[in-house]
Amino acid sequence: MIGIIFGPPGSGKGTQAGRIEKEFHLKHLSTGKILRDEVAMATPIGKQVGRKMAAGDLVPDDLIVDIVRRRLPEAESGSGVLLDGFPRTVAQARALDAMLAGEGHRVDFVIALDVPEAELVSRILHRAAIEGRADDTREAIEERMHEYRKLTEAVLDHYRKQGVRVEVVNGLGRPDEVFERVRNAIGLSSG
Ligand code: AMP
């Protein structure tokens, strides 16, 4: 099973992804986390992407596609993969589809968490106070939301056109309540 979870910054995507991973035995692959680790370890990739990430800009498609290409086979060896934060552009989606097709696989479901923007900003500023992420400043948050809105709809449409089930899930409420909706949505798509 190959799933994708989408959600704007602050939508609770990381929390829900962790729960989906446990419940459906999927390996969670977060490109944002991979990149943050590269930056923290000051690897060549980390040095290349640090400034873009801090500004809330996307990193280049070919770089992120290479990262996923290297990690996907190992992740796929289990019962499935939950991609988090990837694909963010139609070019990335096409590259992913081609990678999966090579293995006889395809995307099974897409979950998109939906949360009003005002709620998102307040959640992220709260997280910034606790975790101190470099891209949790107000300017970077606005840039990331702008990027998200601009690009994500196109990726959702790409999958809708292919007949992949895309479920938009209301992300307001307690994490448990949201997960109940997410679980139902995945159940519908895979069953
Ligand atoms: P996230 O944790 O998914 O919000 O990602 C944090 C940051 O990592 C983003 O703002 C981008 O700078 C970068 N990033 C993560 N995934 C991608 C991707 N698929 N394409 C381009 N940039 C990405």
Image (tube, rainbow, N blue to C red):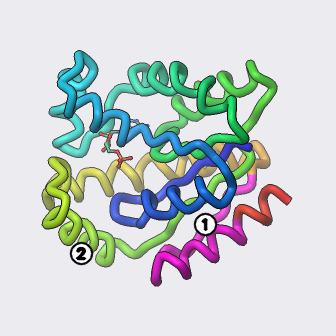
Image quadrant where residue 67 sits: top left
Query: Residue at label 1?
Result: 168
Distance of mark 1 from mark 2, alpha carbons?
Answer: 22 Å
Q: Which residues are magenta?
A: 165-185
Q: Position of residue 174 (x, y in %)?
A: 46, 82
Q: Which quadrant of the render holds ligand 1?
A: top left
Q: Is residue 25 left or right of residue 48?
A: right
Residue 81 rendering spot, x and y as whole percentages? 63, 41
Front residue (pair 90, 185): 185
Q: As shown in the figure, which amino acid type bears the numbered disc 2?
A: Ser
In the rendered image, residue 114, in percent from the top left (x then y), is placed at 49, 69
Name the foreground residue: 71 vs 143: 71
Q: Amino acid at mark 1?
A: Val
Of the image marks 1 and 2, the number of the one nearer the N terminus: 2
Which residue corresponds to the image point at 65% horizontal and 22% vertical from the top-left? 99
- Toward which corner of the image does residue 37 lie, by quadrant? top left
The quadrant in which the N terminus is found is top right
How packed is label 1: few (under 14 Cα within 10 Å), some, or many (20 or more)? some
- Find the residue positioned furthest to the top: 44
Residue that badge 2 annotates: 122
